[in-house]
Image (tube, rainbow, N blue to C red):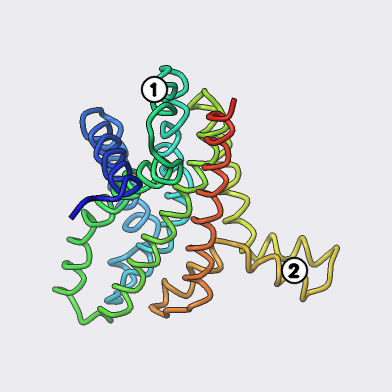
Amino acid sequence: MKKRPGLASLAAVYRRELLSYITTPTAYVFVAVFLFSIGLFTFQIGGLFESRRADLTPFFAFHPWIFMVFLPAVSMRLWAEESRSGAIELLMTLPAPTWSLVLGKFLAAWTIAGVALVLTLPLWITVSALGSPDNAAIFTAYLGSLLMAGAYIAIGSVMSSLTQAQIVAFVLAVLVSFLLTALGLPLVLDFFSGFVSGGVAEGIARFSILHHFDAAQRGVVEFRSVFYFVSLIALCLGFTALAVDARRGG
């Protein structure tokens, strides 16, 4: 069966991007630092073993904050590096739809985040060996974490498409990610409650990544949270495609 041009270019971009991750230190450094950080937070700060509970609550509680910093580091190169090196000029001349370029790069970065999550599975196995955790709830939390990782990478993709400097893309992505995450903190809700009604403050909190990951941490699948993450990813990739199209048109 003959492949559609869009899907063929998506697969080609995905392979090229994934290869660029695994042939440079970027992916290895990210995975190593992620595993070290999540272990440090889970055991030293979260007190996983001291809690004497057979669940991974201390593990998932830190995911939004760690992803917020590390995933912009993975995604900052998606478009900024292409612009800096001049490779984007060649990419722009390819007879491929913009969506396939954007989606191919996004999926490659999301794969790296997925591999990092898979490498934490020994922690789940350890907890299962020591007790009787709710495996369905842990599986749901993993899926929620993967969706959340996609949202942070999509935010990073937009920022990377707006600049040629990776460090600028990183800082902008961390800033936007922090704002979208912190909206769900009680401290921020209290701040907004001083200016607007409680209902409006609650409405603002519903835009928070933290708010929508909370249900997944408890093992609850909420359609509105899945819709939120999928919509956020689609919106960010749409903005990325517009930025790339603007370069093509220029």
Question: Is label 1 or label 2 in front?
Answer: 1
Mark 1 in CB contact with mark 2 (< 8 angstroms): no
- 151 left or right of 23 in image: right
Which of 32 and 75 lies nearest the eye of the viewer?
75
Farthest residue toward the top? 85
Quarter location, residue 217: bottom left
The residue lying at 57 percent from left, 56 percent from top is 181
Task: Give the quadrant of the N terminus.
Answer: bottom left
Residue at mark 2: 201
On residue 98, which mark appears?
A: none
Residue 96, percent from left and from top: 39, 38
Residue 198, percent from left and from top: 78, 74
Q: Amino acid at mark 2?
A: Ala
Which of 224 and 201 lies nearest the eye of the viewer?
224
SS of the residue under disc 2: helix
SS of the residue under disc 1: helix
Q: Amino acid at mark 1?
A: Leu
The residue lying at 19 percent from left, 79 percent from top is 131
Q: Earlier in the sequence, mark 1 or mark 2?
A: 1
Task: Give the quadrant of the C terminus.
Answer: top right
- 194 left or right of 243 in image: right
Quarter location, residue 27: top left
Instruction: State how many labels appear.
Output: 2
Residue 194, percent from left and from top: 84, 64
Q: CA distance from mark 1 to mark 2?
A: 47 Å
Residue at mark 1: 90
